[in-house]
């Protein structure tokens, strides 16, 4: 009988019916590829057995995802282009249980279906400028879950004119608004989260290179990000003794709703792609994977850091 190849679809169905874990899919496919290439002359039965064995060994390692048994909340999903959504997907794929917030009614229509697609049952309104809404979010989490393990803060806002006009023309109100939503909110979120965060908990926020370099049109948001990064360090210093870590991910430019408010954003994308050592733009997935690392025990010794995920752009001089 001529050797037969393993049929990926059949094998996937078999394995997935045995163990309800979508992560296995990657391993199944990897295993099939491996065996189909290297063991072309093995009988189908042997091939199948070996493939299943290989997959189960790999699967066992991965069934206990990096975030299995961990619960946390994500602030900042507006739609499926949001960086926070990229983070949510990576966390979910590694077994985390997630809660989400949305800013207002129109955004709820987008956020709720996304959250539900990851099996999330807790989807709450929260304007981070409203202290009572923040308190309500964390008391609801306490009611439903007791304790949590992580917080993702991916929230920022500035008036459009303050991201266009010369920086010196920034109004007092515009300055306060940008700093309040984009920097102070991390302090407020952390304060409300502290009573429900487990020891070993992790908080991350999203920042940008405009905090330490002048970036055309980034203006008041650059100042807000500088404040945010400083907040990260002060919070990390304070929460370290409770075993809670606080870090920032400094993302390269990605086309999102928030980014659309920045003048000449297309040019920023072009320059980033041209000058990054990796010769490409970063994606939601890149940010999600680095965030996963910072939120998981893999980063158990890391706190107070600003971790660049920008294809290396920040090291390039010209
Ligand atoms: N897109 C980029 O190029 C880029 C690069 C580096 C850092 N970041 C940062 O990433 C984070 C997420 O932004 P994004 O690019 O995914 O855009 P986004 O528009 O998808 O997300 C911004 C989020 O902030 C929320 N928000 C604004 N005001 C709020 C308020 N008062 N209360 C609660 N939520 C509020 C919005 O609802 C939205 O969900 C921001 O901090 C942003 O500065 C973005």
Image: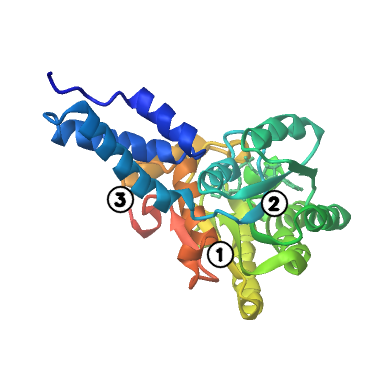
- Would you name the residue on which mark 2 appears? 169
Between the C-alphas of marks 3 and 2, the distance is 35 Å
In which quarter of the view is residue 117 placed?
A: top right
Instruction: Please name the residue shown 35% across and 36% down the image.
Output: 28
> Disc 2 beta carbon < 8 A from ligand 1?
no
Crowding at mark 1 (Cα within 10 Å: few <14, some 14-19, many 20+): many
Crowding at mark 2 (Cα within 10 Å: few <14, some 14-19, many 20+): few
Instruction: Please name the residue shown 42% across and 40% down the image.
Output: 24
Q: Secondary structure at mark 3?
A: loop
- Quick check: can you spot residue 279? no
Residue 13, x across and y down, in percent = 43, 27
In this rendering, is residue 22 above or below 7?
below
314 lies left or right of 54: right
Q: Secondary structure at mark 2?
A: helix
Give the number of the mark in front: 3 or 2.
3
Q: Nearer the viewer, residue 91 or 213?
A: 91
Q: Secondary structure at mark 1?
A: strand
Query: CB of mark 2 within 8 Å of CB of mark 1?
Result: no
- Would you name the residue on which mark 1 appears? 247
Between the C-alphas of marks 2 and 1, the distance is 32 Å
Residue 311, x across and y down, in percent = 37, 50
The quadrant of the picture occupied by the N terminus is top left
Of labels 2 and 1, earlier in sequence is: 2
94 lies left or right of 169: left
Residue 298, x across and y down, in percent = 46, 64
- Would you name the residue on which mark 3 appears? 277
Query: Ligand 1 is found in which quarter of the picture?
Result: top right
- Quick check: can you spot residue 85? yes
Residue 66, x across and y down, in percent = 49, 55
């Amino acid at each position: 009988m001529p050797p037969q190849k393993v049929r990926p679809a059949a094998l996937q169905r078999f394995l997935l019916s045995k163990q309800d874990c979508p992560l296995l899919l990657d391993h199944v496919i990897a295993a099939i590829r491996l065996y189909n290439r290297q063991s072309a002359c093995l009988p189908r039965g042997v091939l199948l057995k070996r493939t299943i064995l290989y997959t189960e060994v790999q699967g066992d390692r991965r069934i206990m995802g990096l975030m299995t048994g961990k619960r946390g909340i994500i602030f900042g999903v507006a739609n499926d282009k949001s960086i926070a959504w990229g983070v949510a997907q990576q966390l979910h794929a590694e077994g985390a249980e997630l809660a989400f917030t949305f800013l207002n009614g129109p955004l709820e229509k987008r956020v709720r279906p996304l959250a539900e697609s990851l099996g999330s049952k807790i989807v709450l309104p929260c304007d981070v400028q409203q202290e009572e809404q923040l308190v309500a979010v964390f008391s609801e989490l306490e009611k439903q879950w007791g304790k949590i393990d992580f917080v993702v803060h991916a929230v920022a806002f500035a008036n459009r004119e303050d991201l266009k006009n010369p920086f010196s023309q920034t109004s007092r109100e515009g300055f306060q608004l940008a700093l309040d939503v984009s920097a102070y909110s991390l302090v407020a979120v952390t304060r409300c989260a502290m009573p429900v965060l487990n020891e070993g908990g992790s908080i991350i926020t999203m920042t940008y290179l405009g905090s330490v370099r002048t970036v055309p049109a980034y203006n008041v948001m650059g100042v807000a990000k500088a404040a945010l990064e400083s907040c990260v360090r002060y919070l990390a210093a304070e929460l370290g003794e409770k075993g809670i870590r606080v870090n920032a991910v400094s993302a390269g430019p990605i086309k999102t709703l928030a980014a659309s408010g920045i003048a000449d954003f297309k040019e920023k994308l072009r320059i980033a792609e041209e000058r990054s050592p990796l010769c490409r733009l970063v994606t939601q997935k890149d940010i999600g994977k680095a965030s996963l690392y910072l939120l998981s025990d893999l980063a158990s010794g890391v706190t107070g850091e600003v971790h660049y995920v920008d294809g290396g752009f920040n090291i390039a001089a010209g």
